[in-house]
Image: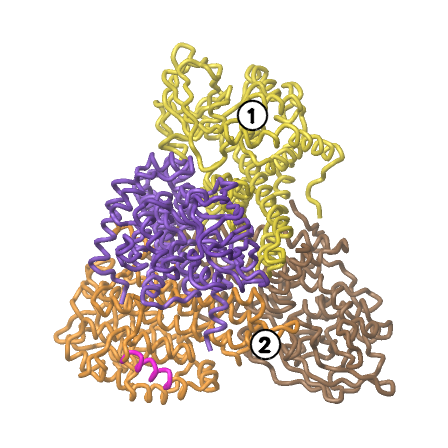
Chain colours: A orange, B purple, C yellow, D brown
Amino acid sequence: MSFKISKPQKEIQKAARDFAKGEFDKDLAFDMERAQKFPEDVRNKAAGLGFIGIHYPEEYYGAGLGILENVLLAEEFCKKDSSMGIGLMLSGFAAECILRFGTDSLKDRFLSGIASGEMLSGEAFTESVSGYDTGDIKTWAQKKEDAWIINGQKTLVTNGGKAGVYCVLCRTDPGSIGADGISMILAEGNSEGLLSVNPRDKLGMRMVSTSDLVFNNVKVPCSNLVGKQGKGVLQALAFYDEARILLSAMALGTARGAFLRALDYVRQRELFGKKLAGFQVTRHKLADMAMGINIAEHLVYEVAADFDSGRSDSGRIAMAGLSACQAAIDVSSEAIQLLGGYGYMAEYELERFYRDAKSMGIFLGNTGMMKDIIAKNIIEKIK
Amino acid sequence: MSFKISKPQKEIQKAARDFAKGEFDKDLAFDMERAQKFPEDVRNKAAGLGFIGIHYPEEYYGAGLGILENVLLAEEFCKKDSSMGIGLMLSGFAAECILRFGTDSLKDRFLSGIASGEMLSGEAFTESVSGYDTGDIKTWAQKKEDAWIINGQKTLVTNGGKAGVYCVLCRTDPGSIGADGISMILAEGNSEGLLSVNPRDKLGMRMVSTSDLVFNNVKVPCSNLVGKQGKGVLQALAFYDEARILLSAMALGTARGAFLRALDYVRQRELFGKKLAGFQVTRHKLADMAMGINIAEHLVYEVAADFDSGRSDSGRIAMAGLSACQAAIDVSSEAIQLLGGYGYMAEYELERFYRDAKSMGIFLGNTGMMKDIIAKNIIEKIK
Amino acid sequence: MNILKYSEKHSAFREKFRAFVKKEILPNAEKWEQDHMVPKQAWKKMGQEGFLCPCVQPEYGGPGLDFLYTVIIIEEMARTRQTGLISYLHSDIIVPYIESFGSEWQKKKYLPGCVSGDIITAVGMTEPGAGSDLASISTIAVEEEGHVIINGSKTFISNGINCDLLIIAVKDPLIENPHKAISLYLVEDKTPGFKKGGKLEKMGMHSQDTAELFFTNCRIPVENLLGEKGVGFVMLMKKLQQERLTCSIMALNKAEYVLEWTIEYCKNTQVSGRPLSSSQSVQFAFAEMATEARMSRLFVENLIADHMEKKDIVIETSMAKYQTSDMANRFANRCLDIIGSYAMDEQCPLVRELRDLKVMPIFAGTNEIMKGIIAKSMKL
Amino acid sequence: MNILKYSEKHSAFREKFRAFVKKEILPNAEKWEQDHMVPKQAWKKMGQEGFLCPCVQPEYGGPGLDFLYTVIIIEEMARTRQTGLISYLHSDIIVPYIESFGSEWQKKKYLPGCVSGDIITAVGMTEPGAGSDLASISTIAVEEEGHVIINGSKTFISNGINCDLLIIAVKDPLIENPHKAISLYLVEDKTPGFKKGGKLEKMGMHSQDTAELFFTNCRIPVENLLGEKGVGFVMLMKKLQQERLTCSIMALNKAEYVLEWTIEYCKNTQVSGRPLSSSQSVQFAFAEMATEARMSRLFVENLIADHMEKKDIVIETSMAKYQTSDMANRFANRCLDIIGSYAMDEQCPLVRELRDLKVMPIFAGTNEIMKGIIAKSMKL
């Protein structure tokens, strides 16, 4: 078996590699990452070449391909530069909610803009510091004639303050508690009464903005409802699964990028008159790193291909996410150690890969949450 | 992608499962394992059903199938009973040397006998306590007319004292040192001058015998040379790769068997008025166990399928071996802990799975050796 | 800095015990392992030479020594390749119940025998349905005309076959609150209605006679009540500190033994003309294990000192019990991996250690129970 | 058992230093982090209040206190959310070279300024081509007419910008044996030919001014030779014990701080109406980390006591350096994972700790060097 990507997939991979090589400038990345900005011309070029929304249908400027192709892009981009790759791949964060559950009209209005690089999207889901508590939602949307009036406050919104459209979880059934009675409604970034506050200074993933959003009588058309009324949490959970696949691929690419940099270094650097790569302990570290990457690769590609075949298993996705994020953290951490003092210096990029890796591990949902998901699946499924 | 086995493969898997269910009696396994014996009638039945040498050509009583099919058998058998599975799957240990490098006449003489359950085979390679030092060989074979005269001593021979044929590494070039000048020659178990000594009392894998062999002017026909003269070590290394795939599958099955037993227990057992499976820490342990198994499955199936496609990569095989053996050790160890006092009792089988798992980890070649192999492959291959 | 202040007398005692081990234990260890039993005679010899119950006071026939003598015996016992002559269970875990909570009559009757080795003790807590959760035991005791009638069964009882005297935890079926329903009683061997089951087949600790015990209308005199009625839980709680500490001392010394043996083996075993210990990864493994063992020893010794000063270190001993037993198992696994093929062979001393050590994170309160206790103390 | 015997004077000193931290350091920490620099004034305040070089003898302007005062300062400094005012590097790693090996003239000239904060010190060992392998440095010093001419460069120098006085390791190009070719010299700031490079951009320790230093025909008087010529290696070796110990104290306290902060956060942060700390897996994580931190503290405190008794514990401090710095990094990673999304935010104190701690397994000899040293001592 051995996962063999097809020829067209290989071409996509190569195109991504070439693009990253040509456009991801190390100094630019360094400056932008510190400034917590993404170079918009890189995004525009990427969009022009079709690298954003490759999994959207062609009528919305996508390429009609699968998550697996998107995974290959994410991996290549993050391998070259974790921060740039993350920034680019999260351009259309949460737009999959529209893709999977939205009406054609919503798809046409928003997916096209995202794929063409004109707008970003983000999720306005959580109201809790934990980042993942979708049940405990107080933001609510009241139906008045042809519009929803949204009031409330969201926290930790990806692309917060930058996105053209947010996918908002709102309580639409006033009497409901918990996950029931919550719906997903789109709000455009420039809506009146919508304010981005408290932009975060982050550990990693710094080319993507994160902020809170305040909704003060934000009025959006009724047609902005995504999917079914009252099913917002279920849709959000399905989206998390899909998002975790992409995140795993970004982490996998980050791990690979860190590994190659470390490998390059230990082959050249000498210690006590011997190449670092000649020490058994160094070699065993390389073996561990390579094995972590190999494992993550298998798990990530599998869940991506499964998703494309209409099979999606939250437990396996959580395993892929855990293994890829752990590989990214471990490999970049060990790479820093192998480079010694240089590893700690920003110039050698690895400290940035490590910060990005650790941030992705948190963004994915922490280890405890992932293990809860895995265990739930096991105990429910295995007879 | 997701590794999907074919329908015929599924049938083989099911046949193996049914066979194990019907023949692997728990009490029998307990008694035989203590006595360090394998129930020969089980072997005969297995052979009769074609479960031994499934990867041999049909003309030698095989099924003409691949390693992957053999891997499926190993997994199913060891899942039901690690000790029985190991005993059965190692019936033809090292016969792959004949299969891959031997003449048709040798294949006919020996593979048929192994596949029909009439004889066992074993490797007489190492002379060192480390178990894997194939270069440091002193046993030598001198050509006299139409025969090889073998003198020397081998240690840690699998199926030692029981096998009908041994694959012996001998120095055939008297002036050579190290790995050069060593050839692979078959010696039948009942050869004059061949003595099995020092049978081992082992930690695990106890249904397979292990002993030393003494060669005192053992005379075998010249045609017993396997493969090329002087290429014995290379052939042995290729065999180790193939053997490690099978061993990984046995470990994977052992991990699965331990996992299912633990899952079963924690679903039923109560502690402080609550099912053990309801405690978060238990659930996270199950998640870790399942993830280890999932990882091993991916890596093991891949190297098996790769082998069948004519691609064999020692580094990836070492990774599969490490991950599978580690999964077997960790899962069976944690399973014992979950069962508490019962886990330590022989009756609950898990202590046996754990001993078998740990023994397989050592038999595979220790972690340091596996990492050396992985690192060598990385440093030589990745540009 | 040396935490424990061993005197010359202590050192002399250690030398004497080492000589005893060499003469009386090591030559018999293999046989005991094969027999799945230690003969009672071996216990008696331990007692005759003064190696049982070092802390029992002279008025009850004991030598009245300090806890360091106990430490010395456990440390040396950890290196005897057998676990059946499990003297620390008898001397430092079970007998202290009698000395602390027993009536004068009970102490006079039983302690001298415990010291001399004529009485081997066991403790019956665990039941088929109740391991870590003592509150759920179902062996019951009912008073009837000056006697107590016990019905039920116990399992995983160390010294289960050899025991001459058993401390048993039972429940009063009339009391609802399980924490107030448990009492401890002393049951002598051969009491009618007290039946010993067969030896249980275990992964390791083969020389240890672990058994099930059955009670069918077993009548014992009311005088055999240990301490007060209904305070079984409290008595058990009071003794947990020493139980966990002695287990920690054993596990620590086992871990050290495993590491030391492996280092020696790797120094002296050549492969391709180089000792196994010349490999850098093996050296780092030893450096890491040596560091952990060093820290663990310091921790345990500090607890010994605190325990001797009668400080409340029940949380710290819970930490030590989990850490040492976990470490010992990790060391055994890692060392077996390091040494290569010899690690499959029962001749290799580490193999027996691997089998024996596997139960240490389970017994005397599982390590999960320990972590729960530590967490509870943090008021999370 | 308390290993370290703090007197009331020590406690009063700690209180005084805590007040200083609260008034002079904490309010400025954010600014220093942003500036990638601590103003010299802050060092002077430390000196004026008697918090620099507590162990320097009174005849050289110091307070002549015992090593526990150093411990107190490091412990409190570990909780200041800044690493730029890296006083233990100055007070306990660099200045001791001058006090131990300096000539009377050097000591009189420099030590009072080191104590008062008028002289900030740095040490120049590492070079672009030589990190852990000091023997391969290529900065050379040649004597010429009563002067010494230094050429070469150093990198990763802490206090590289702020330093008023540098101890530099140089090689005599005429001596072949690298172990006999290395000497130490004192170089004052503003010496012609001594140029400071720009601040290096690092992952963390942002308030720390790490820099490259360049020497182009830098002339210093021969009197600036520290100790004897060619014995640089020996002098360095003699000071490694205290260097590793102080690093261990810092790493241990950082680890404890990370754990304590996380426990408090999880107790006080509710998700779905339950505190984060009510999750069993979180509780077990805390129990495990608390156990390791407890053991590590005991180990380090024991080493402090031994160090104060001038025992040779260079191997043990190597163990502690690797264990504490490794532990601190593991804790930071695990705790960030536990707390959830807030862990991505630079406002979360753990984030800075994660970034700052990452260098601890690298500096002062990588942890791999430490393990090599430990292994060597085991004669494998």
Q: Which residue is mark 1?
A: C95
Q: Which residue is mark 2?
A: A269
Give the tally of numbered discs.
2
Closer to the camera in the image, C22 or C303: C22
- In this view, the residue farthest toward the left is A145
Q: Callout 1: helix, strand or loop?
A: helix
Closer to the camera in the image, D331 or C322: C322
Which secondary structure dominates the residues rendered in magenta? helix
B264, above or below C222, in the image? below
Q: Identify the image quadrant of residue D167.
A: bottom right
C273, above or below D230, in the image? above
Magenta span has B147? Answer: no
Q: Closer to the camera: disc 2 or disc 1?
A: 2
Q: Residue at x 55, y 17 (%)?
A: C106
Residue A183 x/y as whole percent:
20, 67
Label for residue D364? Answer: none
Magenta-tinted stretch: A8-19
Residue C120 x/y as whole percent:
54, 22
Residue B75: in sight, yes or no? no
Residue B145 x/y as whole percent:
49, 56
Question: What is the chain letter for disc 1?
Answer: C
Closer to the camera in the image, D238 or C37: C37
